[in-house]
Image (cartoon, rainbow, N blue to C red):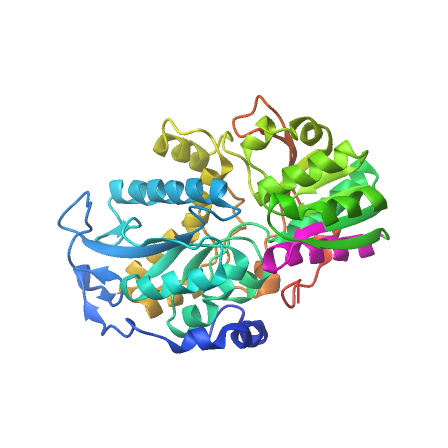
Amino acid sequence: MSGKRLADRKKTTLYVGALVLVLASCRGGDGAAPQEGAGGIKIDAGVTKEACPNAVDKSKGCIYLGTISDLTEGPFKTLAVPITDSQKAFWKRVNDKGGIGGYEIDVTKYVKDNKYNPQIHNQVYQEIKGNILAITQTLGSPTTAAILPDLESTQMVSVPASWTSLWGFEEVVLESGANYCVESMNTVDYAVEKLGVKSVMAVHLAGDYGDDAAAGAKIAAEKRGLTFDNVTTQTGQDNQGGAIDAVVSKKPDLVVLTTGPTDAAVIIGQAAARGYKGKFIGTSPTWNPGLLKSPAAPAIKALYLQSAPWKAWGTESVGHTAMRAALPGVTPNDGYTAGWVWAYPLKAALEKAAANKDLTRAGVLNAVRQLTSVDYEGMLPSNAGNFSASAQDALFRQTLIYRPDDAAPTGVTLVEDFFTGSTAKDFKFEKPCYQ
């Protein structure tokens, strides 16, 4: 296999493949014979000459994309529902502008709930994979890892709703923005230079999400000569006692927090109630504007900052403006922002594949290997979205810092614009940080 990230992919494929090898053996529904579609474009699984169910133009064919998200009861449902709705609006805008290569895109027929459970994620993926060309959203790091061997074996390009550093080594995965590892490196560097911290604690969920952020925090803490503690927790309001005890007893200057929003509120609120006066900087998924209406709101306003991979809902850019216009009347939530940003690379890959006259799965993957940049319409800098380079060269290293603000549309206001700390700038990206 040629193209992006080959040497390092072998290492990570062995790691993930050993974890879920059994899942890769079931390939029902794949293997559709290529045929010629509209405009002489080669097509196979997930692409039909017939129009989409809700087509704007009934004369066009249909590209079906899958969505697997945390829609009902998992820890990220308050983010996942807006992510999913935003992507429906994103692809509707694409269809309203004429679609891609004589086809419109359907992201409504094959939407599944993973309940943030890897086994359920794989189960529902198996149900839809034979009917889709690619996946416009696969939410979660450990959940997506559960289908990774199958994504590779079927050449199914997918868009993660997560930022683990593993994705930098997987060419079937189209990630956007800095990963959790880089985000936490930048967080620690920011806290050293702007807040004068000398001790750091990572409080995080187990798995690729939390472990990746904790790894970045540890790398930066060691480089900056800070003391570092690592505390693993689990989801659920009643499961945060150990984390709270650790924060209160060790009193680190900075806690890098990598949980869901509800868990973050419990940890911040109860640690503050027990006298903790340091700073929390939470990775992007720790935030939800509803936290400012929670009992922990005073503590959050006093002690919390949010690190982020891109700018919030109210930002003025072509992409942000288009997103807001496509989602009239919604309550602002940066789940919408994330969903919109994440869709751009797959749009670019489909456009490239259509130009190459090959909208098969193999054709889309080949198009990904040719992407040197992605037009995010100003939502990410122009140097984001290079999928043809090595993991080291393609790694996007810029993040931002926000603070709680009742007056802001999504409850946060920009403190530090796109920046790269000294740790991330010098970091040699040779394997996923959490390994």
Residue at 30 percent across and 73 percent down: it is 28
The answer to whether any part of residue 421 appears in the image is: no
| Residue bounds of the magenta highlight | 203-224
Residue 434 in the figure: left or right of residue 99: right
Residue 166: horizontal and vertical position, in percent? 57, 63
- Which quadrant: the N terminus? bottom left
Residue at 43 percent across and 35 percent down: it is 318
Give above or below for 330 relative to 189: above
Residue 145: horizontal and vertical position, in percent? 51, 65
Give above or below for 236 relative to 402: below
Residue at 48 percent across and 77 percent down: it is 21
Work out whether residue 294 or residue 364 is closer to the camera in this orientation and state it: 294
Residue at 53 percent across and 51 percent down: it is 384
Q: Is residue 220 magenta?
A: yes
Residue 267 in the figure: left or right of residue 129: right
Residue 59: horizontal and vertical position, in percent? 13, 50
Q: Report the magenta stretch's main SS.
A: helix
Work out whether residue 68 or residue 182 is closer to the camera in this orientation and state it: 68
Q: Is residue 211 magenta?
A: yes
